[in-house]
Amino acid sequence: MTADISASHSAGGVAPDVLLGLYEQMAVIRGTERAAHDLFLAGLVKGTTHLAAGHEAVAVGASAALRPDDYVFATYRGHHHAMARGASPAECLAELMSKGSGVNKAKGGSMHLTKASAGMLGSYAIVGAHLPIAAGAAWSALLRGTGQVAVAFFGDGATNIGAFHEALNLSAVWSLPVLFVCENNLYMEYTPIGSVTAVDHPAADRAPAYRLPAEVIDGNDVVAVADAVGRAAARARAGEGPTVLEAMTYRHFGHSRTDPAKYRPAGELDEWLARDPLEVASARLAVLGVQAEEIAAADERAARVVAEAVAAAKAGPGPDPAEALSDVWADGGATWRT
Amino acid sequence: MTADISASHSAGGVAPDVLLGLYEQMAVIRGTERAAHDLFLAGLVKGTTHLAAGHEAVAVGASAALRPDDYVFATYRGHHHAMARGASPAECLAELMSKGSGVNKAKGGSMHLTKASAGMLGSYAIVGAHLPIAAGAAWSALLRGTGQVAVAFFGDGATNIGAFHEALNLSAVWSLPVLFVCENNLYMEYTPIGSVTAVDHPAADRAPAYRLPAEVIDGNDVVAVADAVGRAAARARAGEGPTVLEAMTYRHFGHSRTDPAKYRPAGELDEWLARDPLEVASARLAVLGVQAEEIAAADERAARVVAEAVAAAKAGPGPDPAEALSDVWADGGATWRT
Amino acid sequence: MADVITYREAVAEGIAREMRRDRSVVCLGEDIGAAGGVFKTTEGLFAEFGGERVWDTPISEQAIVGIALGAAMTGMRPIAEIMFSDFLACCWDYLANEIPKMRYMTGGQVTVPLVVRTANGGGLGFGAQHSQSVENWALAIPGLKIAAPSTPADVIGMMAAAIRSDDPVVFFEHKGLMASKGETAPPGHVVPLGRAAVARQGSDATVVALASTVPLALEAAGQLAVEGPSIEVIDLRCLVPLDMATVLASVGRTSRLLIVEENPYQGGWGGTVASIVADEGFELLDAPIRRIAAACVPLPFADALEDEVIPTTAKVTAALRMLLAY
Amino acid sequence: MADVITYREAVAEGIAREMRRDRSVVCLGEDIGAAGGVFKTTEGLFAEFGGERVWDTPISEQAIVGIALGAAMTGMRPIAEIMFSDFLACCWDYLANEIPKMRYMTGGQVTVPLVVRTANGGGLGFGAQHSQSVENWALAIPGLKIAAPSTPADVIGMMAAAIRSDDPVVFFEHKGLMASKGETAPPGHVVPLGRAAVARQGSDATVVALASTVPLALEAAGQLAVEGPSIEVIDLRCLVPLDMATVLASVGRTSRLLIVEENPYQGGWGGTVASIVADEGFELLDAPIRRIAAACVPLPFADALEDEVIPTTAKVTAALRMLLAY
Ligand SMILES: Cc1ncc(C[n+]2csc(CCOP(=O)(O)OP(=O)(O)O)c2C)c(N)n1
Ligand SMILES: Cc1ncc(C[n+]2csc(CCOP(=O)(O)OP(=O)(O)O)c2C)c(N)n1
Ligand SMILES: [Mg+2]
Ligand SMILES: [Mg+2]
């Protein structure tokens, strides 16, 4: 798919079938997030969740523009990235449901979904911490001469923590093949980002402080995201260093768990729902001549995938208690003394 | 002196006697730094020193423009700030020489000179750590409504650490009365700052990332420093928030201890010696009509002060061993258990 | 009977009482204002005291505690919230190198009356980066006072002591206890830092516990009491000052010591307590000193796995049985 | 006789040996390149391996270890230098929350073969923020291996083991030992992590020491030997894996244990060692377990004050005399 979209771009537009595929991917993610929400309310998901419904276009658009061997680093709000990179909805939901069949063997949980075999190198629950780590994967790619890029996705709130600053400066100085993609959804938890940040675009407006190129993009338009990420990745692979992208988007649910998001001004959610990434893609599909039935069929396929994933996750085994004491060390164990 | 210099500025120039006073202050600091260097070589100063010879104009110029109740925070290279704010050369040298008569009772050492009674709230040896602390003093001034400002002096190297970023953003958002004054001496230890920083002016070029005003100033011209600090302090007191100043300067000695500074390109030191803050001030004095004899007299007075300080510091008592176990807690003690 | 209050409510109540009596007390942290904090432990403060005294911050842990330090040095009594104690790692330089050393390295010139509050501990399925019990991190740093209350009344009383303290205090609020209820504290209630509480008297063995492990120890003691053995439970309440007098006196009576900690065994605070008893209380002991602590692994997500790792009543009971049988 | 080498030189030698055999080993840190590091512990590496493998960084401790982590996850074996161990506090999130938990919380998907090297310890008059011994900070974090060699040969052998380890290792190089000399290590010398060394055999008491306190313990043992008592000195070499088998076996022979640590008593690593012995070795003991550690204060600047705070040979000797007289 990667090759397809870039090809279609250079051809001056996205091929309808490619875009329909992206649409379906987003629909699967949306459905899985809804399912996660329902499962949480039903008491089947413990701990916490941070749902990415609304953010799908960022993950799917970026993944479409990346190589399979590229590296992706996400936050605790990372279900969409895990799935966009190839973790199955079933193994993600199983992880949320504390199943041994979870993608992290129920040792990580919602905030730490990881699919290393697909280059999805983790979800990080300490805000901003993964930006230097992503830079490190990029450094490694440079040292090994593989042409891989690393992408760090992070929230608007992450732009005020020190690790952001250190990562951007060092990546710029070393000209690392890393993309810093901010998912600006206007809020850090319950606080509007504008009230705690000195600039309007917390990521893009800071890029000049590191002499980096930046772009503010429509994070709800999967094509716009794929396009921008594709260009930034190409620059990175060409040795031209990092790019900062700030994707404007919105989360449909509250911050986490059962947050009712009362801090949002009336009408704001509706405005954004009108620009739902699925709607935006639908509209693009219509323009490209894709029939409503084809879109409905994609919706149905996605719904089926989600339903099967829920069933599979529910049916999964509980974690093996022995797992509690494994995987600390590379030898598989947890022995710290003789 | 504070009032004088601002008055003279608004009058469109510095009064000769005021400038001569600043010159003499700088000469005292220079002499004290030279003495510290010699005492280190003689084995009378233990641990380490980071001499500020060459940076005098930043400290003296800033102090001249500040109120006595303003707060100053410096780095491990902070002798000049301690003295400019009123710590005596004798108590500073005594501290370096591990004397009980040291300004920190020999518990701090060269890197931690502090004179709280003069608003000199410490020298910090973890790069960048004091920027948020200075912001806190500014916040406190705001909360107490005192009109005080806080000034953080830091090196060019400090601009790449996370605390810099966090401090500037929060200070900007809260519009705190704090000045961030970078002493850009071109090097972080042995590495040219340009080789590890993405922008040319590591402090000033980043101010826009926090929507802060910035100025690059001649850090070897005591008048230029006083002028810029005076204006920034006035803005801060007027509720207009922080300012970033980047003072270009140069250290005459190596980074610390006996560093021969071989990493400097040939001729660089000489170029800067030609712009020695004392020379710059001398030249300005000459223009103002101050006679060479008056300057020589100031030099002599300064030399006498330094000689007396060295003698006094040498004569000071060693530290009371009981001091090792005092001053952890506000009750004066160090008891952590019953 | 006195009013009942939750541990969570006690935090806000404890802060509010001090804010009413001392205008120099101010709060800062992420989402602590109108939102009332993610654990609702600052609920009502913004409404009562306003934005002049309750400040929302960006996600900037270093700035939060750094600013609190600067304010404390210059006449204020700030209370900084670090949302989860795991995030203390993001501002550890301030906790390890700045705050606790300020007074000492300036030769006593500077006083640092601040409180860093933080939600601590596991048991809620928050995973490896949101579940740690890290009082032991603070214990490694001379110059910090360390409070970790286990009851609502102690939360209020120790909060008062912490805020009034002229020394920096790290105040650990246990996430697993937030919903627990207890008597509220009478007006003016202050629990001096550094006094352990004998939460249950007993004569056959001493259990030393802290925060979340206090209810575990009490439950275990209750279970064993049915069978006969009488267990003394000491709630340390603080790690610094550390009330070893109470611990040693108890061991003097019982001759047996079990320490129950939520932090990992390696580097846990119980090591310090055990080593003092193994030295100064050596002759009091009739049995080995036992420690029940978390396994030396990161905290796993699934409840079933987390239970394997952190102390449970069953593990405490089993350890006590072994100790009593020695 | 074998060649003599300083501890400082051994660091660079140990790194160089591994860089020669494995191209995936790369170094990064502040001033480590052409300048050779502020302690000259990377001297010669830049000249031999060039800027492609020895990278100078800005003052960005979080970026340094964060980048090392990302590189380690993707096929490299980075060695990150944190100039003074006190500065680990500036990147503690990576040491506490990221590096050690990565493998576990991903269910074993990710391997983290990295080394964080750092100059540790006091005794040089560098003051409160440049003198701490912080191996105990790392001990509080499951998932980190902890090396702290005391001799040049061990530096080389343990550096080899650390770099070859597929687990993250924090490697403490003691500032006070930098100038000390000892035999160099033969080619291919590897000292497996987690094996303590019996630095001196003895039968009357066991001293457990680490890094700088090893020479103190040996000196004290030497002084006492003149008077008769025979002291066994164990150089732990690592805190994780912790070789308690060697310690317990020694205490089994001597019945007396003194632990000598440079970190403060409160929260010190000796607490963990003592508590294990007080539990598993309880019946072996004929005397209280003693710990000589730093006083619970920040490190003062003046030599005369620093000597009051950190362990000295005199303090070790005095403690041993008391223990032997018990
Ligand atoms: C260092 C740190 N501080 C605070 C938190 C608590 N926290 C979790 S998510 C969050 C808000 C993050 O906002 P943003 O970066 O915009 O991401 P979003 O949740 O909107 O996707 C906060 C404060 C954290 N996880 N890590
Ligand atoms: C967090 C931290 N990292 C590294 C150091 C070691 N160090 C001390 S001074 C220094 C260079 C600082 O350069 P700069 O900020 O330009 O100040 P200058 O010494 O030139 O005045 C370094 C790296 C430190 N003290 N703190
Ligand atoms: Mg956000
Ligand atoms: Mg500099």
Image (cartoon, coloured by chain):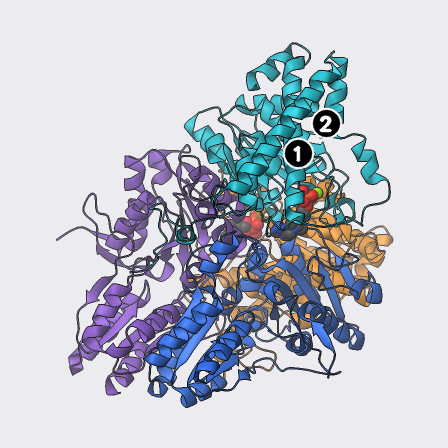
Chain colours: A orange, B cyan, C purple, D blue
> Where is residue B68 shown, x and y percent of the image?
50, 25
Q: Secondary structure at mark 2?
A: helix
Residue C80 percent location from the top left of the image: 43, 45
Residue A285, horizontal then vertical, whole percent: 73, 53
Residue D20: image quadrant is bottom right
* Residue depicted at x 54% and y 40%: B313
Q: Earlier in the sequence, mark 2 or mark 1?
A: 1
Whether the residues at callouts 2 and 1 have beta carbons within 8 Å, the answer is no
Kind of residue at disc 2 = Leu
Residue occupying image coordinates x 21% and y 69%: C249
Q: Which residue position holds label 1?
A: B31
Above-or-below relation of C150 to C316? above
What is the number of the mark on residue B278?
Answer: 2
Q: Nearer the viewer, mark 2 or mark 1?
A: 1
Q: Chain of mark 2?
A: B
Q: Is residue C301 at all visible to an observer of this figure?
A: no
Q: Is residue D28 left or right of residue A250?
A: right
- The reply to the same-chain question for discs 2 and 1 is yes
> Which residue, as the protein is rendered here, is positioned at the far left?
C1
| Label 1: few (<14), some (14–19) or many (≥20) C-alpha neighbours in 10 Å | many
Q: Indicate left or right for B220 with A159 as reference.
A: right
Q: Is residue D261 above or below residue B256?
A: below
Mark 1: which amino acid?
A: Gly
- Classify residue D58 as left or right of residue C298: right
Alpha carbon distance from label 2 to label 1: 11 Å
The numbered disc on residue D223 is: none
Where residue C180 sits: x, y (%)? 28, 59
